[in-house]
Amino acid sequence: MTTNGPKTHPNDKANNVQMKAELNDHQWPHPSEMDINNLNDHLRTTLIDIQEKYVSSKGISGPRKHKPYQVTLEDQKVIKYKHKTWKKYSQTETSPKNFKEYTRARNKVTKIIRRAERDTESNICSKVETNPKLFWKFIKSKTKPGDKIPDLKTKIGLTNTDQAKRP
């Protein structure tokens, strides 16, 4: 794998038979021939080479940001510009010129995000006949589960469960 980040090696994808055969056929040095550090390095590099050869690896990516909408390359440039103007303003908070520049960029980004969300929602709604699963997935993500119905209280302030405990 050509990714530079960390990798995982799922054991169920390993070619155990060939790996075992290569470990048995390897010419291991006798411990008296090398000092302990060189022996350790040789063992480690041999095992890593065999692992890369016979165990499939899968790159581990970091946490992904949830973006429910699509923004164009131009929109991404505007968002980067907003970040740049915020950094510039936060370093010199006394400059009203920098603040005005930041607020313009912020408002522009807000407009872009709202437009992108609206376009995404209308796209989902237009596909409701052909792809109802996507529609209901979107609806489920927007609706929060309601609270349970609270216990009924009597005139003296006791709930139904309190009355059961009452002597």
Image: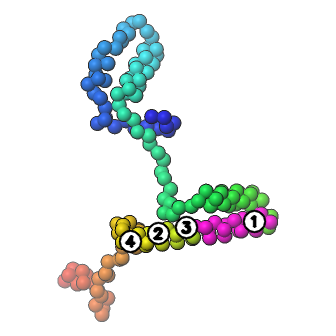
Q: On the image, numbered disc 1 is attached to which residue?
A: 101
Please tell me whether residue 106 belongs to the stretch shown in magenta: yes
Q: Determine whether the residue tagged by mark 1 lies in a helix, strand or loop.
A: helix
Q: On the image, numbered disc 2 is attached to which residue?
A: 123
Q: Determine whether the residue tagged by mark 3 lies in a helix, strand or loop.
A: helix
Q: In the figure, residue 164 lies in which quadrant?
A: bottom left
Which of the two discs, 1 and 2, labels the residue nearer the N terminus?
A: 1
Residue placed at 28% from the left, 90% from the top?
154
How far across and down, in percent of the image, does residue 38 sit?
46, 14
Q: In the figure, residue 124 lies in which quadrant?
A: bottom left
Q: Amino acid at mark 1?
A: Glu
Q: Amino acid at mark 2?
A: Asn
Discs 3/2, front: 2
In the image, farthest residue toward the top: 33
Classify the position of the N terminus by image quarter: top left
Circle 1/circle 2 CB separation < 8 Å: no
Q: CA distance from mark 3 to mark 1?
A: 23 Å
Circle 3/circle 1 CB separation < 8 Å: no
> What segment carries the magenta color?
97-113
- Please tell me how crowded label 4 is: few (under 14), some (14-19), or many (20+) other residues with Cα within 10 Å: some
Please tell me whether residue 8 belongs to the stretch shown in magenta: no
Q: CA distance from mark 3 to mark 2?
A: 10 Å
Q: On the image, numbered disc 3 is attached to which residue?
A: 116
How far across and down, in percent of the image, does residue 153 sit?
30, 88
- Please tell me how crowded label 2 is: few (under 14), some (14-19), or many (20+) other residues with Cα within 10 Å: few
